Image (cartoon, helix red, strand yellow):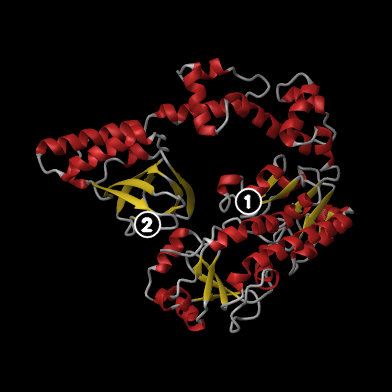
């Protein structure tokens, strides 16, 4: 394989907190990005990744790197033209994590060699390049730990010892344990017990009438009392109490996260919707619901629901809302006596009280509403200096469109404009959202602009257009762009989570770039 040093460009980048950098905007190059210090986010092809110290990324498309470090986020970038590329096939697998103490001197030496023009410097650069590629594609830190995780997951009833796992990875037990903990954040034993508890919750929830003893045996614990103690220590309740959360087996067939309402009422559904593309890092649901839904059959709401996936959970009752494209309007006819059809509602509390009425938890719903109202009042008082002056507009910048939200008919707008005291621009439309251009936003001329749910690369692209700077809020530095990817005020748990994060997030969320 013949490579030429002039094909490659190397640069170092340093970003302060809140700043973003566009990478490979013209999409004409391949790149290796290495984070040498700090942390942030990397967005490419609508995939959102954590940018963390020691990690490398192979990029084939444009990307946005954003710093969330109080200190600098520092990175190195190596790029080469796609035309005539000879390295892509080597970089199709994940790249190994490598500590900066090992990698930063190599990057600096490569950078220095690339700047020099002598033949020896060019040879030195290519030698260093191959050395770096060898380190980053070393399977020891990638494949072996992934294989160990799968071995543990698939052998719960007869688990491997650390010595056996280390031997399979061709490592010493001490080195293996250190590498495993670096990758998973847990020791092998902790990981084994975590996987046992996930499987136990699935068995308890999905198998009507199963006993704790039967579950213990299936996950490799012969002593049911030890299993109960372990379960309680990790989950905060014994298995018998956990099973009562699904004493009435309820499946949610909806494109709304109604499982949020059920869980807040103390009931875990046997099946519930998920969005694997939107929440790829947390099993298709917001991270604050992930642990609460362990054991629940997650239904892919990005596609038409499959009736067998629902019925195999043997639900006693199905809570169903109208679906996009009328999915499953007649598919569950054989189970109609079990289906409770819930019409779409304008207020999160309407869902809460109707579901509470279904399951006999009305008094608990009243306590939940009172608790959340108290939180809203506290946040409203805290944000008063920010919200009392200026006319606000709320937008969602998407890959192909911009949505401008109105004054109501949406859980988030009700929270902002009624619950938290934000003042909507008087010329906003009454309800829902509209597709608009930047020119129309500039004509609206809001004093303050709140950007929600938007990916960094879409915001960065929009902020580098001529019309963007014509918006009053942009010119006066009153654009707020909080981390809101998981904000969902339609359910009690999501609403509480948003209220907990909102004050500190909004106050430090002025868009700096």
Q: Image height check: is 244 above or below 167?
A: below
At x 30% / y 52%, what residue is drawn? 29
Q: Which of marks 2 and 1 is nearer the N terminus?
A: 2
Question: Which numbered dot is residue 481?
Answer: none
Instruction: Name the front one of labels 2 and 1.
Output: 2
Residue carrying label 1: 286
Between the C-alphas of marks 2 and 1, the distance is 27 Å
Nearer to the camera, 287 or 174: 174
Is 406 positioned to the left or the right of 295 in the image?
Answer: left
Q: Image height check: is 302 above or below 152?
A: below
At x 80% / y 43%, what residue is drawn? 314
Nearer to the camera, 177 or 69: 69
Q: Image height check: is 354 above or below 124?
A: below
Residue carrying label 2: 21
Query: Quick one: label 2, few (<14), some, or many (20+) residues within 10 Å?
Result: some
Q: Which residue lies furthest to the left in this view?
A: 118
């Amino acid at each position: 394989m013949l490579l030429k040093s002039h094909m490659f460009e190397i640069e170092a980048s340093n970003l302060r907190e809140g700043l973003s950098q566009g990478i490979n905007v013209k999409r004409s190059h391949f790149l290796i990005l290495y984070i040498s210090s700090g942390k942030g986010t990397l967005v490419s092809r609508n995939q959102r990744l954590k940018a963390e110290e020691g990690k490398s990324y192979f990029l084939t498309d444009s990307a946005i790197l954003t710093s969330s470090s109080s200190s600098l986020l520092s990175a190195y970038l190596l790029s080469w033209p796609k035309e005539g590329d000879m390295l892509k096939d080597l970089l199709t697998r994940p790249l190994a994590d490598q500590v900066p103490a090992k990698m930063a001197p190599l990057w600096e030496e490569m950078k220095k060699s690339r700047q020099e023009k002598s033949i020896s410097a060019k040879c030195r650069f290519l030698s260093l390049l191959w050395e770096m590629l060898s380190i980053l594609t070393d399977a020891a830190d990638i494949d072996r730990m992934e294989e160990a995780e799968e071995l543990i997951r698939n052998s719960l009833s007869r688990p491997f010892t650390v010595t056996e796992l280390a031997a399979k990875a061709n490592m010493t037990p001490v080195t293996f344990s250190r590498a495993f903990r670096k990758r998973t954040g847990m020791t092998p034993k902790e990981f084994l017990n975590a996987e046992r508890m996930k499987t136990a919750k699935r068995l308890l929830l999905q198998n009507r009438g199963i006993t704790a003893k039967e579950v213990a045996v299936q996950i490799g614990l012969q002593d049911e009392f030890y299993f109960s103690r372990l379960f309680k220590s990790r989950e905060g309740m014994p298995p018998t109490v956990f099973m009562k959360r699904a004493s009435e087996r309820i499946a949610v067939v909806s494109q709304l996260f109604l499982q949020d309402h059920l869980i807040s009422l103390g009931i875990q559904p046997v099946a519930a919707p998920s969005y694997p593309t939107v929440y790829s890092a947390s099993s298709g649901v917001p991270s604050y619901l992930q642990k609460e839904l362990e054991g629940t059959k997650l239904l892919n709401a990005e596609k038409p629901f499959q009736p067998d996936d629902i019925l195999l959970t043997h639900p006693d009752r199905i809570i169903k809302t109208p679906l996009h494209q009328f999915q499953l309007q007649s598919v569950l006819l054989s189970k109609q006596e079990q289906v409770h059809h819930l019409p779409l509602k304008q207020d999160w509390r309407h869902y809460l009280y109707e579901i509470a009425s279904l399951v006999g938890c009305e008094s608990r719903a009243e306590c939940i509403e009172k608790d959340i109202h108290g939180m809203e009042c506290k946040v409203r008082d805290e944000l008063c200096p920010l919200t009392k002056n200026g006319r606000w507009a709320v937008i969602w910048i998407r890959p192909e469109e911009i949505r401008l939200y109105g004054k109501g008919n949406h859980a988030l707008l009700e929270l902002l404009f009624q619950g938290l005291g934000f003042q909507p621009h008087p010329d906003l439309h009454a309800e829902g959202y509209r597709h608009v251009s930047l020119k129309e936003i500039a004509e609206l001329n809001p004093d303050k602009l709140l950007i929600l749910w938007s990916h960094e690369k879409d915001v960065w692209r929009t902020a580098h257009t001529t019309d963007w700077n014509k918006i009053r809020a942009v010119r006066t530095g009153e654009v707020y762009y909080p981390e809101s990817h998981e904000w969902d005020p339609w359910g009690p748990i999501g609403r509480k989570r948003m209220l907990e994060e909102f004050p500190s997030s909004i106050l430090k969320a002025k868009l700096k770039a």
